[in-house]
Image: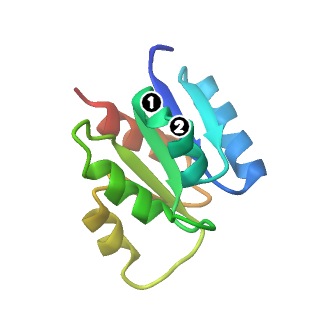
Amino acid sequence: MSRELLIAVVDDDESFRTALIDSLGSLGYAARGFTSADDFLAGQADASSNCVITDVHMPGMSGLDLARLLAGRRRKMPVILVTARSEPGIDDRAAESGAICLLRKPFKTRELMTCLEKALRP
């Protein structure tokens, strides 16, 4: 993969966010971390990112809300949702939000790569 592609990682869990950024780097992607959806939007990272990987459950705006917001924009941003929780209806809500994939923590690198390939497909 090309370093020209920038992946935004939005997660309030610092250790997970850092580990995911490191994993993305080892896969050849540039990645930038954000502590919340508001932090991501305030930094105008949506203008420079090629894809967003975000936790479903965060304080403030949820990952589902962020996915809906980005899906409604002129330049649609592919979103990959991640969650550690098992809850009824989450798959349907993720699909309805416009997200490309829903990954359950902990996930395998192969699962992440499959979602990224789908999200970044021209």
Question: Are there few (<14), some (14-19), or many (20+) residues within 10 Å of tag 2?
Answer: many
What is the x, y in percent for residue 10? Answer: 58, 48
Q: Is residue 19 left or right of residue 45?
A: right
In terms of image quadrants, where is residue 58? bottom right
State how many labels appear.
2
Question: Are there few (<14), some (14-19), or many (20+) residues within 10 Å of tag 1?
Answer: some
> Of the residues shown, which amino acid type is indicated by label 1?
Ser
Q: Is residue 52 left or right of residue 57?
A: left
Compare residues 29 and 13 and report the one nearer the observer.
Answer: 13
The answer to whether the residues at label 1 and label 2 have Cβ atoms under 8 Å apart is yes
- Looking at the image, residue 89 lies above or below residue 78: below
Would you name the residue on which mark 1 appears?
49
Q: Residue furthest bottom?
A: 88
The mark nearer the N terminus, 1 or 2, is 2
Residue at x 51%, y 65% (from the top left corner): 62
Label 1 element class:
loop
Would you name the residue on which mark 2 appears?
8
> Of the residues shown, which amino acid type is indicated by label 2?
Ala
What is the x, y in percent for residue 122? Answer: 22, 26
- Looking at the image, residue 101 lies above or below residue 51: below
Residue at x 63%, y 68% (from the top left corner): 59
Residue at x 68%, y 57% (from the top left corner): 12
- Looking at the image, residue 85 lies above or below residue 26: below
Label 2 element class:
strand
Q: Is residue 29 left or right of residue 25?
A: left
What is the x, y in percent for residue 20? Answer: 64, 41
Residue at x 48%, y 60% (from the top left corner): 63
What is the x, y in percent for residue 102? Answer: 41, 59
Query: Label 1 to label 2, Cα distance in Å?
Result: 6 Å
